[in-house]
Structure formats: C-alpha cells, structure tokens
Amino acid sequence: MINQLGNYSLYIALLISIFVISKTSLSLRKSSITLSGNIFSLISVQSIMVIISFLTLIYAFVTSDFSNETVYNNSHTTKPLFYKISGTWGNHEGSLLLWLLVLTIFLFIFIVESKNLSQRYRTLTLFFQQIIIFGFLLFILFTSNPFSNLFPIPNEGTGLNPILQDPALAIHPPILYLGYVGTSIIFSSALAAIISGSINKSWASHIKKWVLVSWVFLSIGILLGSIWAYYELGWGGFWFWDPVENVSLMPWLCLTALLHTIFTLEKRDIFHSWAVILSITTFALSMSGTFLVRSGILNSIHTFANDPSRGVFILCFLFILIFLSILIYFFYQKTIKENLTKPYLISKETAVLLNNLFMMFFLSVVLIGTVYPIFLEVINNEKISIGPPFYHKLLIPFLIPFLFFMAIGPNIKWINDKIGKINFTQVSIFIISIIVSYFFVKKYGVSYLLSLPLFILSIFLFFITIKDFFGKKVNISQKISHFGFSLLILSILLNGVLSKEFSSNMKVGDERKFLNKTIKFESIKVIKEQNYQSLIGEFNIKDENNSLSLKPELRIYDQPQTITSEADISSTIFSDNFLVFNVLKNDGFYNVRYQIKPFMIWIWISVILISFGGLISLKKKNV
Amino acid sequence: MSKNIKLTSIVLIVLFSFFVLLKGLDKSNTYSPELSTTKIDFNFKAKDLFSDEEIFLDDLIKNDGMSLINIWASWCLPCRDEHAYLLNLKSLYKLNIVGINYKDSEINAKKFLKELGNPYTNIITDPKGINSIELGAFGVPETFLIDNNSKLIIKKFIGPLDESTFNQLTKLIK
C-alpha cells in the first residue's frame, strides 16, 4: 500500500513538471513574464511530493518491506538500522531518487533566495531546471522505478553489498550529489542569464553562492569516497585514478576554474563568455559522471549498481541537454556584453587566467584518460586500461609551474602591477625552499628527475601561504583554501616518497623482521556479529622504543556471502600504520600486508581546510 | 561565418561522442570472457621467456592428450605455494605445462625458477597482462586444464592449486 504512495507522488511531480515547463516556456520569447504565486506553490508541492516518495522508500527499507523490489534486492532483515537507511541510496533506483530529491529542493531554495532578482531570469532558470527534473522523473518512473512491486512477497531480502556497509560510504553519495546537483542550478541560471542578457557583475555575485556550495560539497564528497577507499578496499592508497574517481574529479576541476572566474567576473567585469562556457561544461561533466557510473560502460572496480540498458536513456538525455545549451549559447551569444578592455600582463586577471588554463589542462588529461579506453574499444576493438603512470607522467611536469604561479598569483594586484620591485621575502623563501628540499632529497635518496623541483615548489608554496596569513589584505577564506591546497600537495608528496610496505604469508605465532621493527602475529579470534562473522587478527609491531598492537579484521557476511577485509589503521599526526590481512587457501596461512604511510592524516585535514575556506567565503557578504 | 564553423564543428564532435558512447553501451564492459563459453582463442603470439623467440601459444598445446596452462608471476606469493604441485604434475604425470608469466620482470621470473625448479615445458611472457586477461584470467595464479585436440577448457582453477584441486586434476588427467 504505502509503496503506491511513493509511486503516485512521483507521477504528480511529473504532471507538475509538464505544467510548469509549458507555462514558463512562454518567457523564452516574451520578456514580460512574471513568476506568479501559482507557479511558486506548484514548485513547493512538487518538492513535497518528491520528499514524500523518498521518505516512503526509506520507510520501506526500515520496515524491510520486501514487496518492494528495490528493498528486496538491496536489503536484509538482519542489517543494522543505519545501513538499512543508507541502503536507500546505495542502489541504482534509490540513488536516482536522491538525485531528484536534491534537484527539487535546490530549485525550491533557488526560487526563495533569488526573490529580488529579475523575474525573467528567475522564470528561465526555473524552466531549464524543470527540464532536468522532468528528464530525471521520466528516467526514474519508466526505466528504474524504485517502487516496483513483487508478488508473492519474499520472506527475506538478498542483502546490501557488504563493501558498501561503511559509515563513510553511507554519507558519501548524498554529499557528492549535493555537489553534482548544485551544478545543475549553475547550468540553468547561466542559460537563463544568457537569454535574458544579464551575464554581468550582479549575476556573478548571485551565482557565486551556488558555485561555492557545489564546490564545497563536491570537495567533501570526493574526500569521503577517498577515505572509504583507504579504509575499506585495503590497498593502502587513497587515490587510484579509477574511472569512477576521475568522474567526480572532473567536475571539481571545472568548478574550481569557474570559482576563480566568477570571482574575477564579479570584481572586474571580465570573462563573461568564459564563465558561461564553464558553467555549462561543469554540469555536462556532472551528468556524464552519472551516465558513466550508472550505465556500467566503464570498467571499474567500483561500478556497483549498473545496468547498460538504462544507459541509452541517460545518454540521450545528456546529449539533448548538451545540444540545447550549445544552441542557446550560439544563438544568444550576442547578448553577452563582453568587456573588451585588455587586462595588463602583470595583474591578478592574468593569474586567474593562468589558473584556468592549468585547470583545463588537468581536466583534459583526466578526461582523455577516462574516456579514451571506451572510444578505443568501440572504434578499434582494442582493450587497454589506463593507470596511474599515465596521469603522473602528464600531470606532474605541469604541476610544477602551476605551484609556482599559485604561490605568486594571489599576491599580484588587480588591473596592473609592477614586476620591477622584486619581493625580498618571496626570494628568500624560495632560497630556503631550495635548501630544505635539497637536503631532503639527498637524505632520502629520491631519484626521480622531477622530484627536486616538485619539492622545491611545493615547499615554496607552503611557506608562501603561511606567510600570507600575516599579510595586510584580509581574504581569510582564500588564504585557508590555498594553504590547504599547499598542505595537500606536500602531504601527498611526502606520503608517496616515504611510504614503506611489507608483505608476507604468516601463520599464528610467526615473527618477521621489517626495517627496525618486528611484526608478530599473536592470535586470531572469531566473533559473531549481527550480520557477519568476524575474524580478528592480533598483531604486534615492536621497535626499540615502543610497541603497537593492530587488529585487522576479516568480515564474512552472510547476506550476500562475501568476505571483506577491514584494515586496522593507527594514525598519529606523523604517520599511519596500516595493516591488513587476507585468507590464503592453504590452511593456517594469512597474507599480511603492513604499510607505514607518513602524513596520511594531513591529506584528509588539508581537504577539509580547502572546503572550510569555501564555507567561510560563503558566509561573507563581500569576498 | 567563423561562428558557423565553430558551431558545426562542436556539434559534429558532440554527435561523434554520442554515437561512440551509444555503441559503447552495447559492448560487454567486463574484461573477462564469459565463463559459459569454454572455447578460447589460443592463437596469439608471445615471447618465450628463455629463447626470446616469438611463438604461438597454439603451437605449444599440440598433439594428443591434455595440457595445463598456468598463469604465474614471481611477485605472487600464492604462486610460490602452488609451485610444488606443478613440479609434481610434471614429474609424476609428464603433463605438458605451459606457463604464462604475468606482468613480471624476466630477471625475477628466472630467479624464481632457479630457486624453486622449473615445471614448465615452455613459458611465454605476458608483461602487460593483456593476453592473460583475454584468456579469461581473473588474477594470478590461475590454471586451465585444456584438451589439446579440441582446445576446450576442461577445468579452470582460480587461485593457487592445493591438495584438493591437485587430486581433482590428477583424476582428470587419468
């Protein structure tokens, strides 16, 4: 019964969507359309309908209502309540419903918070946003309905993929989606602003908030995914250049470029067309992300819920949106009043432009690395897989100048600055960085050709961003974000260079030597938990001064039968001790992997700092 | 005029991507051939570990009887464990064992064989791992028992051989 409630409310939302689209489409031609109270209340009803259907699905999951096919496929009565709830969006149907939920809520918020802006702009944004909502509603209702009935009603569900039963992953999709869907508002509003001819400073200062919100959520979403991969997948890494990870990184890169462009547009009234192109691209990338992950066209370790037959729908929808935006861009291009004063070479404008160029380069590398295998297979029938070496080779040489410009860029003034006065502090910091990195590289014998310049510049950027905190100009949010970024690069570098790994087959009682430490496999315990059985190994790692005990786990889930391994990680501010073990077929032996990963925690902290900077900027009236 | 060229070229690129992706959807997206079809194409060329010559895998599984294809690597710890079983199969049953050295360095591979003995009649190298994936391997070690005449896979062992799989194998060979 309650199942039908969710289903029908989605149909009502669809009807509202059709009605609103036909009403607001009038404003494409006429410029005097105003947003009547009726439409506003319809939008509210639509949001409420989607909320109801989402709550219905959660309710079905919580009460383990197996007459619902989605619940049957993805839940089980023995699952803890928390994972029953997070199971709602841990599958294809539910995750799309979540997309839709965020879409409608964001639209509602947009309409409310843009009250004192031009009516035409608001109506047009509403129009484009409703097209997206309409597409998603069709997709959900006709290809992946979360409310399909099963009869006769099964007694028991088939369970949620245990690898997804993790707290970080439970909140990872909602956060990431907030970021993705935020870009849809940017897209709709950019199109609306082109048509109504209002790409200008005030548009920039309005849409800036949405750019920041999406950017902050996207950053945190990516962080959570990465933390999950680190803990759960048991490889001891945090970024694998896996296609699914790349797909979330691409909109982020584009959004970062947009963020800087929007600030410049707001301050200096330049880069109009570029801001529009970036807005469209960012959303296209977010949608392609959904397409690539959901259709299963990618070959990735974590394509979970996918179904190629549904891919055709998202693909067509995605390309309709892309065509629509290309056409609108070209037809209304003349309404964009580009400010044709040329910026001076040495100015903050140039610095922002450089930032954008680098972002576009990084984006193209990631895009090609992700999409090329698909194209190659279709055209040439050849299978390849592109791994980290590709990205490292292409990105690192360009990261070096990028870090340099990032260090000096923010200190250049708007409009026109002089190169004549060489900043004494900057030069001395640069010299200090050279000395520090020279000794570091020498001590640890890093032989990689580019490592010395890479170290020099990341340390340079690190010092400069610290120094900037004591500067006169107050733009604390930018300082925090940039400092976070320099910290991120530095921790990744140190982590990469100083990590140590040990791997061996051991049985209980064995002892192995590694560096100056002794690793002892002390005992193994079996514990029965609510929905899995757990094998807990006890390891002791000793060196001269202290001993550390680590307890990695192997979980044997019943529903569905799967084994997952949970690494035990002991984190200090200097390094992580990471230990994971796995069953071998031969009785009694376990494959043990022990890793020392320095500065791991700083990678997480730095991303939090980066996002925190964005949050502060959101709070302030004038950035 | 230039605006039209821009528009057309962008539209063409987008259309092209659309059709490629659309076609990509039809393709099976997993890199392992289906398990239900046990007929596999062994007709590919690869380098021999010791002689450095390019040889066809097909030529190594000729004549009557059966062959064993074993995918291994010196860096793979379970391979070390199963090695004794392979040596036994070679010495006790005179089985033709073809090794595929998966994503390995030649020096390490040779060292490994020197240390533990060489059960293989021939070893071909697969430095990129693509041939092994094409054969349907999930990882190392993996072992296929093959009928030489029909080139059909009789049995596939995923993971290292152990006591029970060894017994299964010996029964199948007799």
Image (cartoon, rainbow, N blue to C red):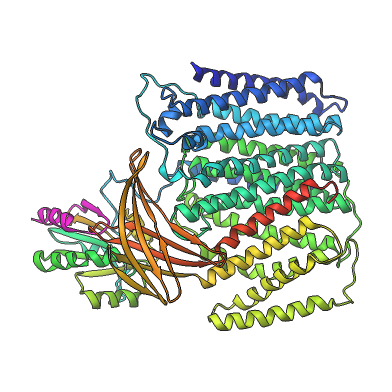
What residue do we see at 56% from left, 34% from top?
A96
Q: Quadrant of residue A207?
A: top right
Q: Is residue B172 magenta?
A: yes
Where residue A178 sits, quadrant-wise, is: top right
Of residues B45 and A140, the one nearer the viewer is A140
In front of the other: A507 or A195: A507
Residue drawn where x is 82% and y is 36% of the image: A195
Q: Along the horizontal axis of the image, is A532 left or right of A98?
A: left
Tell me if residue A350 comes above or below residue A155 in the rendering. below
Is A149 included in the stretch rendered in magenta? Answer: no
Look at 18% across and 65% down and name the residue there. Answer: B86
Q: Does the image show residue A551? A: yes
The percent position of residue A618, horizontal first and vertical second, equals 77, 46
Q: Position of residue A341 (x, y in %)?
A: 92, 57
Q: Is residue A258 left or right of residue B131?
A: right
Tally of marks: 0
Query: Which residue is painted at 36% across and 19% down in the image?
Result: A152
Q: Quadrant of residue A214?
A: top right
Instruction: Tell which of B77 and A534 is nearer to you.
Output: A534
Q: Which residues are magenta?
A: B150-174
Where is residue A126 drawn, in percent x and y? 75, 30
**Residue A599 place in picture, x, y as percent:** 56, 66
In this rendering, is residue B57 above or below A262? below
- Judge whether A68 appears above or below A200 on screen: above
